[in-house]
Image: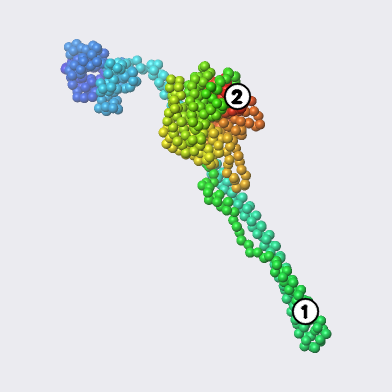
Amino acid sequence: MAVSGKKASKQFLSSTTSMASDEDLQIYCQPCDEEGPRLPAHGYCTDCKEHLCKTCFRAHKVSRFSKHHTLQDATNMPKVLQQPSTSIHTGQSDVLTTPCLKHPQEMIKFYCNDHTELLCSVCVTLEHQATSCKVDYIPDISGDILDSKQYQDILKTLNHTSDQFQQMVEDVKNMTNKSNSSLKESLAEIKKFRQEINQRLDVLERQAEDAAKVIKQKNNKNLKAVETTYEDMSKSLKTSSDKIKQLNTSKQTNKLFMELKLAEKTIHNVKGKTQQLLSYDIKEHNFQSNDEILNFLKTEESLGTLTHKTFNTESQSVQIKSRQPSHEGEICVKTSKDKYRCWIIGMTLLTPDLLIITDYDNKAVKMVDTNSQSVSDQLQLDAELWDITTVTSTQVAVTLPSIQTIQFISISSNKLIMKHTVKVGGNCHGISCYQSKLVVSFFNPAKLQILDINGTILTTTDGKYIFQNPRYIICNRSSIYVSDSGMKRVRSIYGSNDDMKRVTMLNWQGDEIGSYSGMGDPRGMSLSDDGTVFVCVWQRYGRHFVIEEISVDCSTGKVVLQDHKRPQAVCWCGKTKKLYYSCYVSDEKYGNFLQIYKLS
């Protein structure tokens, strides 16, 4: 279509225009010119500010995204090319040419507000219908985006996030340097340990050599004395023999007689001396090695264990808060079904209002309503039970050591319902669940296993060199904590034993990555909302029994409750900031009650 009388401004000219001369200008369909063949304009959309060919003009009338736009036919449409959008600035190209990831042949032109997704026309048609989604045409909504609050906020967030990642890069570099440095130190420690072993073996070798030398010197002295005696007696007998022969030749009968008698006496004395010398015990020596040392070296698989602590970009050493405890009361858990005094040995919090506990002596699982402070239901089992853990919001698991079984129990309509069981290979005690994985500790022999809900063994950690009596377990995303009431280390080459009681920290591969010791005898544990560990402790430094809080990395600890009656099991509620614990005492005043403390 020829247009005369006006010349198009060069700043509005693009590939959609073709100039025959300065006075002759043909206007083409802008959408088609962007993505397809160049076709003459048949009309114009005042909303999109685009010239359209016949096909695009017809489609524009029926599309639900543009059917309400104002259209002008060929007669009324502008006779010069218009600026497509207010979002296009002079000298800049803002054509929608980004291909859709799902439909590469289509360009992204729409935005779904409900799903916050960029879409092409095919995406809109197939997945984001008008009846279910609010979809906008991008040129219709992008005009006010320049220097907008959204622009400023996103840019600020991008810069902040970029700075965070840059800091993380620096942290990773620092952690790498620390890790390499620690490995260098570990290699030096291995060399040092080997030198210590060599030095000790050198000492033992010198001791054995010195003992052999003493025996050799003594033997040489005694044998030299025997040799000298024999030589002297031989000379004396030879002298007597020669003299007798001479006297006999010279016919000196008197002297011969006396010499013969002296010879008889000498022979008698010599025989007696000979018997005495022969009685001296001359031994042949050999070396009998200490097989215990050799067997120890044969059975050991390494010089030692290369332990490590996990670096975490999150705060791994959460500081222990200063907490002010206040006694909030107690809950009686003794029921009419109980035959004996209660021994509450395990507990887990299902909700802030629902505490599930295990009563060892009465072989019962009890549901405690913390609001009414009473036992709302009780389930009797056939064997003594130990620890308990929350599996889901409606299911718990309990260990039964004497029958080597894990019992699953569901909670429905405020009732405890016995479900399936899983047989395990040993006397199971501690149990903790994280993301459908059960971590279980065992006695005799001491070990730790990670199982799935069906009882399939995923990992086994031999506790031979880590712990001896792993009573309780708690775990989170990165760590497993084990309370050990008596770890016995292997006899060292220097002949000493090292007995300890401690909380051991493992990773999910079963490697020891930290420990906290010197506290006394640790029992039940519970994780705080900060990731620190509450642990019941017996006989700390000769003082009364306490509850202690240990840092996330087991580097430090602080007593939060002290002078209490043998705390056995403990449970923390982060929402109410309350700590529940049981006591193992014969006094029913304490044994049949759960104590409640607020820690603020």
Quarter of the rendering containing residue 235? bottom right
Q: Which mark is residue 263?
A: 1
Task: Check whether the beta carbons of the residues at disc 1 and disc 2 lie within 8 A of each other.
Answer: no
Q: In this rendering, is residue 304 above or below 106? A: below
Tell me the mark number nearer the camera, choosing from 1 and 2.
2
Report the disc number at residue 46. none
Residue flagged by tag 2: what amino acid is it?
Glu
- Residue depicted at x 47% and y 39%: 425
Question: What residue occupies the far right of the structure in this picture?
Answer: 254
Please tell me how many numbered marks the rendered image carries. 2
Question: Considering depth in this image, is 523 or 422 the residue closer to the camera?
Answer: 422
The percent coordinates of residue 405 (x first, y second) are 47, 34
| Marked residue nearer the N-terminal end (1 or 2) | 1
Which of the pair 259/336 is nearer the observer?
336
Q: Nearer the viewer, residue 574 or 14?
A: 574
- Please state if 84 lies on the left or on the right of 515 as rendered: left
316 lies left or right of 28: right
Q: Secondary structure at mark 2?
A: helix
Check disc 2 and report the residue beneath it.
Answer: 588
Residue type at mark 1: give it: Ala
Q: Quadrant of the C terminus?
A: top right
Q: Is residue 11 left or right of residue 531?
A: left
Residue 62 visible, this orientation: yes
| Up-down relation of residue 510 to residue 288 (above or below) | above
